[in-house]
Amino acid sequence: MVDFQSRFRMYSYGFTSPERKIPVATRRELYHDTAPLIFKRRPQTHDCRVETVKEHEDKRDWEAWLLSRGLEDTCRSVDLLHYKEITDKPGEGGKRKPDKLIIRVGLKGSGDGDFVYPRGLTSTLDGDIIVADTGNNRIQIFNNYGVFKKKIGAKGSGKGQFDEPTGVTELPNGDIAVADKSNKRVQVFDNTYAFKYEFPTCSKPYAIASDQEFNIVVSTMNRTVEVYRRGGKLMYNFPVGAKQKAPSGFNITLNNKDEVIVSDPMDSKVKFFTYSGKVLYKFEPVSNNEGLAVMPSGVARTSLDQFVVADSLNHTVNLYTERGILLQQILCPTDDIGTVQACALGPEGHLITLEYSIMGQHSLKIFRYRPCDCHASRPNSSKRRTPTPQTS
């Protein structure tokens, strides 16, 4: 019986016998290696492989074998990420190096200090940590030690109420701006967390940031960035690129050059835009080993114009220059870090992360980053379910 491809050749070039005139071992060899000899009038077979693969002339180097090599590299890289070398064995003397994790706060739940799919995080100049607890439709405030202070908001569309808050930031005067996603608005509160004003957004907001001129920049679920003047007047609205398969948000931060830094998990890149939407440059965060893809999530700017970028896929946090040069791996899975959704830097030198996953932790974590006086002599970590004592 003649297959479809042979019939197609017969109709195009006239009748040719489909029988094998030359012994061949496999069907792939028939149609690729010896096809010009068997089908005399057939054009030379086109090799559509990439250039780096064409050099593999050994017949054993087919796609399955190459795929297995890539999987081996990936498995080896994952093992290296989860490997922690013990350098302070008993009997060597010296003091044990403290863990990077200082405090872990919260579980999945609705109690004070617990979270349900938290997405927004910021650290104020006073050291307070503010979390947008998206699933519980509220904002929670902690001090720099992770101790619960207060909460505001409930589900609704009124003033001071939220419907899936996903972003939070501090304004230069100490006010707090919250991205209220499903209500398609931004709410602003004073430093005592009393409601001040609100303004609507063009699309559902996700992340939010502010500069020293009180401009409020919002990333949206439609993969756009909206820039507002103080009070809520829209200045610019531009897309960030990459195809959108479904509504998805992304985190942003600002520098002191009127630039928006976008951490784009859809495109696996960190991008720099002007307020008007012009792309200045972009870089792809690198994985620390071969065979690992990268999904950037949280992003934060340091005082030296360097950028902390969280990788939610590999459970790492790395430090980059603004041109994308990897300077340091700050955190990895051996430091008890999970699926990071947002990150921030505290004024005292702490690195703060917000984590959640479907089967994992929903928690706030505080890590050592720069030397700080508050934990200089603390040898171990404190992992607490909730930062408030349980009362009966």
Image (cartoon, rainbow, N blue to C red):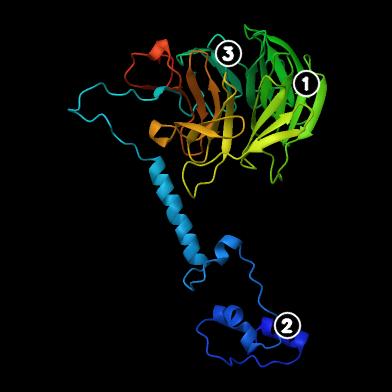
The local secondary structure at tag 2 comes to: helix
Front residue of 368/43: it is 43
Q: CA distance from mark 2 to mark 3?
A: 70 Å
* Amino acid type, label 3: Thr
Front residue of 169/135: it is 169
Q: CA distance from mark 3 to mark 1?
A: 21 Å
Q: Give the mark nearer the N terminus: 2 vs 3.
A: 2
Task: Point out which mark residue 228 bears.
Answer: 1
Give the image location of residue 36, x and y in percent.
Answer: 64, 84
* Amino acid type, label 2: Phe
Task: Point out which mark residue 8 bears.
Answer: 2
Q: Give the mark nearer the N terminus: 3 vs 1.
A: 3
Task: Please say whether residue 279 is visible from this viewpoint.
Answer: yes
Q: CA distance from mark 1 to mark 2?
A: 61 Å
Front residue of 302/98: it is 302
Quarter-of-image position of residue 81: top left
Front residue of 241/191: it is 241
| Classed neighbour count for the residue bearing mark 3: other residues with Cα under 10 Å, few (<14), some (14–19), many (≥20) | many
| Residue under pointer 3 | 124
Give the image location of residue 348, x and y in percent.
Answer: 49, 13
Residue at the image point whose x is 46% and y is 61% from the top:
68
Give the image location of residue 198, x and y in percent.
Answer: 75, 16
Give the image location of residue 165, x and y in percent.
Answer: 64, 25
Quadrant of the snapshot with the C terminus: top left
